[in-house]
Amino acid sequence: MNKRIVIFHHGLIGSGGGERITLEEEKYFKGYECNPAILTFYYNPDIFNGNYNPNVVNISPKRFSKHLLIKICQKIKNLRKEISKIKPDHIIAVGEEGCVYVFFSTLFTKFKYSVHIHQTIFWDIKTYRNIWDTSPFLLGRYSLIFKNVYNEVRNSTFGHRESLPDEPPKMGFKKRLLSEALGFITFKAVSKAKNIFVLSNKMGWEIEKMYKRKSIVLKGAYPESIKYYEPKINIKDYYNIYNKKVLLSLCRLEPKKRVDLIINAFEILSKRRKDVVLIIGGTGSAEEELKTLVKNLKIEDSVIFTGFIDENMLYDYYYYCDVFVSADHADYDITTYTAIGFNKKTVWAIENEVSDDLINSGNVFPANPNALDFSKAIESALDSKINGNFNPRRYSWESYFSDIYRYL
């Protein structure tokens, strides 16, 4: 085939879901006898403990300007130059921001592009609990071009309502001008994409509201080989956990992930039963606050903070857990779907989309995002049985990327 494929990801720095999809996509296309390349301005080769070996082209300027507009122009110039050099058959941008850069980098050329939008700018919450945006790009969601849909989109999920202001905030002239420019450019860039790939019908609905475009809903989260996984370490022995059920939470310890909700739910549950232990994997800005919460609730003996989990041990945690718990404000959570791939029972917030096959499988227990409802859902999951009708291939990387290639 030897198709040249460019995947543009603005920055591959942290070990998150979007970064994993990009690296898995490059890996899949490489094995599909294509010539993929990831173009990025920022790259950390140690993400996921360096377990990937991607073809990455760092197109960062030698020296960034301190002026925002000049800095953006530098990036566009370098991206445009590299695209012209590679002459790709397909270009895939990651996120709305990535789409904007590719839009300008392919303007007045023959190149067309598709885009992954894992979450729109309404989900990329830097305003959690009314903290002002730290990313200028997010100002676009407050522009007039999204004014008619702002309230409808904001009111569509609990997390949006909790995190975004009731009305677009008032701004000074310069910030308002930036907001309007970013909103208009983002709208134009996404609207021009050949294909828009999303991970849920919920996200597809949001894209249609914002950009007046239909999306392609495809889902993937883990390799098919997951069903044959043999653990390297017995996690229960590793932590001296005996005769207890293991609840597992894996995520960045950031406010958006709502791990405090999981801890409060576990405290309620632990009053009713003593056969449970909660393992919290990950690091982040909220880590010390969460540890203090556990101490104040006097449940230190039943809660284990692992810190950062090495990629080589990650699947061992999934393998030995009894119930996986996620309270993340998300429509689709790769870490939770990975637990489902291991045929584990999972509890997640009702904001996550649940297809009929998962409901019927007995794997998934949605809960309202409050501690009491989560504790009830966890107990239901602990006491239930999986019916065994779930087909894990449906959410495999192989299925996901083969469908993407077909659309390309």
Image (cartoon, helix red, strand yellow):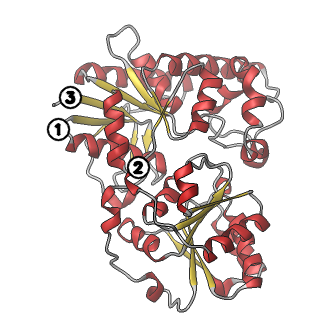
Instruction: Say left or right for 86 vs 311.
Output: left
Instruction: Say left or right for 162 vs 51.
Output: right
The image quarter containing residue 56 is: top left
Judging from the image, what secondary structure is the residue with disc 1 in?
loop
Q: Residue at x 45, y 59 (%)?
A: 390
For residue 3, the mark is 3
State the CA–CA distance, disc 2 to disc 1. 23 Å
State the CA–CA distance, disc 2 to disc 3. 26 Å
| Mark 2, residue position | 394
The image quarter containing residue 119 is: top right
Q: Quadrant of the C terminus?
A: top left
Instruction: Say left or right for 390 vs 288.
Output: left
Q: Residues within 10 Å of mark 1 (few under 14, many from 20)?
A: few
Label 2 or label 3, whichever comes before in sequence order: 3
The image quarter containing residue 136 is: top right
The x and y percentages for residue 227 are: 34, 65
Label 2 or label 1, whichever comes before in sequence order: 1
**Above or below, comparing residue 359 to residue 124 in the picture:** below
Q: Residues within 10 Å of mark 2 (few under 14, many from 20)?
A: some
Can residue 156 be seen here? The reply is yes
Q: Nearer the viewer, mark 2 or mark 1?
A: 2
For the residue marked with disc 2, what is the amino acid?
Arg
Judging from the image, what secondary structure is the residue with disc 3 in?
loop
For the residue marked with disc 3, what is the amino acid?
Lys
Q: Nearer the viewer, residue 77 or 146?
A: 146
| Mark 1, residue position | 33
**Above or below, comparing residue 266 to residue 234 in the picture:** above
Q: Residue at x 62, y 71 (%)?
A: 381
The x and y percentages for residue 157 are: 73, 43
